[in-house]
Structure formats: C-alpha cells, structure tokens
Amino acid sequence: MLSDVELKVVVLGLGYIGLPTAAIIARTGAQVLGVDVTRSVVDTINSGKVHIEEVDLDGLVSGVVARGTLRASMEIAPADVFVIAVPTPFDDDHAPNVGYVLQAATTIATVLKAGDTIILESTSPVGTTEQVRDLLATLRPDLRVPGRTGDQADIAIAYCPERVLPGRILVELIDNDRVIGGITPRCARKALTFYRRFVRGACVTTTAKAAEMTKLTENAFRDVNIAFANELSLIADTMGVDVWEVIRLANRHPRVKILSPGPGVGGHCIAVDPWFLVHAAPEQTPLIRTAREVNDGKTDHVIAQVASLIEAMPGTPVACLGLAFKANIDDFRESPAVKVAAAIASRFGERVRIVEPYAAALPSAFDGTGATLIDVDTAIETCGIMVVLVDHDVFRSIPLEERAGKAVLDTRGIWPDQPRFVAAEAVRLAS
Ligand code: SAJ
C-alpha cells in the first residue's frame, strides 16, 4: 500500500463537500489536487483562503495549502484515487441531472491508468456508479472495468456518499460511519482502504446500488419526518394549540421523537434528494412525494400567515429574521426563509426589513422590492412586527423584554415565552 506521502488524490468539485474532503485528505500528508471549473474558486484556494463559510475550514485550508499538500487547478492530473464531489441537481420535472458527474468521469478518463480508484460521493440516482463505469469503459477500452471482467479489472469504482451536516462538516467527515458501495467487493475493499486513512467512524461495505439508495433513503427519511412535524403545525394552528408544546409533550413518550416544524425545508439535499426516489419509482412513492409537497406547501402557508399579520397592522414595519436555510450558517440555497421574505417584500416593499447576520447584502431575490437589510438591534428598535424564519443563535438570545408588545410570528419556535396571543390575535383579526 502507498504511504500517505506517496498517495496522490484528485478531488473533482471544490464545493461544500469537495473542499473540506480535499483538505482533510491533504492533512494526512497525501498530495491532493482539487479540480474545479470556476477560476475564482481555484485562485482563492491557492491563496490559502476559502470561498465558503464552514466552521474551522479556513484554518485547515490555509494550513494544508501552506504545507503544499493541497493545490487547486482547473486542469486534472494523474493520481491514484479520484473523488467526485460535484453537484447533482434536478431538472424542472424533478428528473435528476447527473451531467456534472458524467463530465467529471470524462475528465478522469483522460488521465486514468491501471491501479487507480474512482469514488463517487455526489448524491446520485441508483445506478449512476454503473453508468460511470460504462462511460469509462467506452472512453478507455484499453482498461478492464469492474463488474464486466470478473475479478480481473484494472481499475476500482465505488460509491461512497457524504453524509455530513453543514456547520459540522469537519467533525462529521471524520467521525461519521461511511457506507462504501463497490461495483464489486474488491472495489469496495480498495475504497475502504482509502477512507480508513482519515475516517474514525465505521466503514461498512456493500454494493454500489445499495449505497446509492442508502443515501437517498437517509434524506427522504428526514424529509418525511419533518413533513409530519409541519403537518402537525397546520393542525395545531386550526385548533389554536401550541404545536411546540404538543411536540415537547409527545416526545416524552419513550418511542416518539418528533422533529421541529419550520417555514419549509431548504438546502440542496433534503429538498432535492427525495425526488430522485420519486422519479425512479413514481408508483411506489406516494408517501415520499406527499412529504415533499407538505414541506413545500408549508412555505406557502407561512407566506399567507405573514401577509395576514402585516395587513392587520397597516404601516407597521416588519422584520424578517433570517434568510439562511437553517440556523447558524451562511447558505441560502433553496432556503424557505428567502422564499417567504422575498414574497413578502415583493408585496409590502419598503415596510419589509431583513435581518441576516450571515449576509453582507440582500440576495438578488430582493432586487427592486424596496426591502432593506438591517441589523438585529435596529430591528428591535424600529419594527413592530417580527417574523422568525431562521433559528440563528443571535435571534434565540433576544430576551422577552425586547420583544414585548411586538406582534410575533415565530415559525421556528425559538421564543416559547412569547405571549402567543399577539400573533394569533392579529392573524384572527385579519382573517
Ligand atoms: N428542518 C426542519 N425541522 C427539523 C430539521 C430540519 O424544518 O426538525 C429543516 C432545516 O431548517 C433545513 C432543512 O430542514 O431547512 C434541512 O436541514 P437539515 O439540518 O435536516 O439537513 P441538511 O440539509 O443540512 O443536511 C442533510 C443531512 N441529512 C440527514 O440528516 C439525513 C446531512 O447528514 C446530509 O449529509 C446532507 O443532508 C446531504 O448533503 O445530503
């Protein structure tokens, strides 16, 4: 086996998963080349800086770049292990788009040699790893690919999904268990040897297809469970019951663990991945599809609730607290908070003030609306209506006396001590 210093690794895609992964591998002493199609990303990393916000990532990247074990480039180079960590979005009809994965495989084919290992980490529809294998077989007929030539393959191909939580990526990359699916058992073993270099969690081997479905299952499981919480919040609203209290009480049952309602489900994973299962098996997925619809519908419900509250209090400035897709991160992709705040801003214009400590400027969704970005203290001083869209710690810490007398719509349940009648009464008056 190659020692860490001799091992050459290429990571394709230097985003939220690829960059931390590349940096952690580089910390083991392996020579890592990160490849990305965006010039500014490559330049930023080579100057020892990061283009994404993630706890402790800046220090790690500057360290490994300074040591010379991590370098970024727009050009691929030969290596022993290739890790694909590119996006897999879906098209308008919810069909998964694996174009970036196939593009990455095409790039790898130009430098691939016997003995190399290719690992796909991107969330992918079941069968994608075999698709990568078939593409490589076509592009490089000189190499024997696994699963077609018994145990005699020249290269190893495996699927190993990332399962890290934004905000805890560096910890979870090391501590989480990994599922490693090989096209053949030999492929899985080769990939396992690689992950053992930096993963402390258990590494469990399986087939590529089972690993692909496992990843989709994890995120669909969470989506379905959040949908249950969101549905409860709708029921509780119609009954005038505090859903947060009901959930707290129900969770005292030893086998009940209800998640938290919110303004909808955001991010690039949980709001996307369940569609891969629905698209692959439409007849068999009524529950998973409905969960997606419930979670998306919750965002529309919150928009209507906020609009009623604002209409009930003419002229009162309204503060929308948070834009990120979840607490304490700067990631606004697929964020329900952005959807709610932008819809409200386009309707109520200058009355709408946005508070988002993780944003230097308002995203383009607010262009031309008249909404402004203000800090939390100004919001407390000037806004009679407060809408909590994200449970950032800085919002959680606002004491009751600073919120007293305000009409509050708390979609995240961060202020259990807020007199609930204020918002409920205003909404009732407006309806
Ligand atoms: N949310 C709720 N209520 C909850 C929990 C979450 O409304 O009780 C919302 C969040 O506010 C957010 C969305 O759901 O808008 C998703 O947040 P999340 O923290 O559940 O998940 P992500 O998208 O940050 O990361 C998920 C994780 N998957 C699972 O927990 C099964 C992570 O481990 C995966 O690596 C990641 O997706 C991914 O990349 O697939």
Image (cartoon, rainbow, N blue to C red):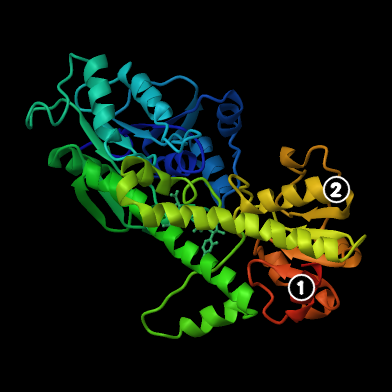
Q: Can residue 265 be seen in this view?
A: no
User: Which of the pair 203/210 is nearer the observer?
Assistant: 210
Q: What residue type is labelled 1?
A: Arg
Q: Judging from the image, what secondary structure is the residue with disc 2 in?
A: helix
Apparent side of residue 93 relative to residue 147 in the rendered image (left or right): right
Task: Kindly identify which residue carries mark 2.
Answer: 349
Q: In this view, does 134 lie above or below 151?
A: above
Q: Position of residue 401 (x, y in %)?
A: 83, 80
* Vertical position of residue 213 compared to residue 74: above or below: below
Is 238 rendered above or below residue 121? below
Q: Front-most of 16 and 320?
A: 320
Quadrant in the picture for residue 288 = bottom left
Tell me the amino acid under the disc marked 2.
Gly
User: Which residue is farthest front?
Assistant: 431
Choose top left, top right, bottom left or bottom right for residue 105.
top left
For label 1, the crowd category at 10 Å Cα-Cα, with few meaning under 14, some 14 to 19 and many 20 or more, is few
Nearest to N terminus: mark 1 or mark 2? 2
The residue drawn where x is 58% and y is 77% is: 244
CA neighbours of label 2 inside 10 A, class few (<14), some (14 to 19), many (20+): some
Residue bearing mark 1: 428
List x then y, in percent, for residue 208.
23, 41
Residue 322 is situated, as x and y percent measured from the top left of the image, at 70, 57
Where the C terminus falls, by quadrant?
A: bottom right
Tell me the number on the disc at residue 363. Answer: none
**Quadrant (top left/top right/bottom left/bottom right) for the N terminus:** top left
Please provide percent x and percent y for residue 380: 85, 67
Element under disc 1: helix
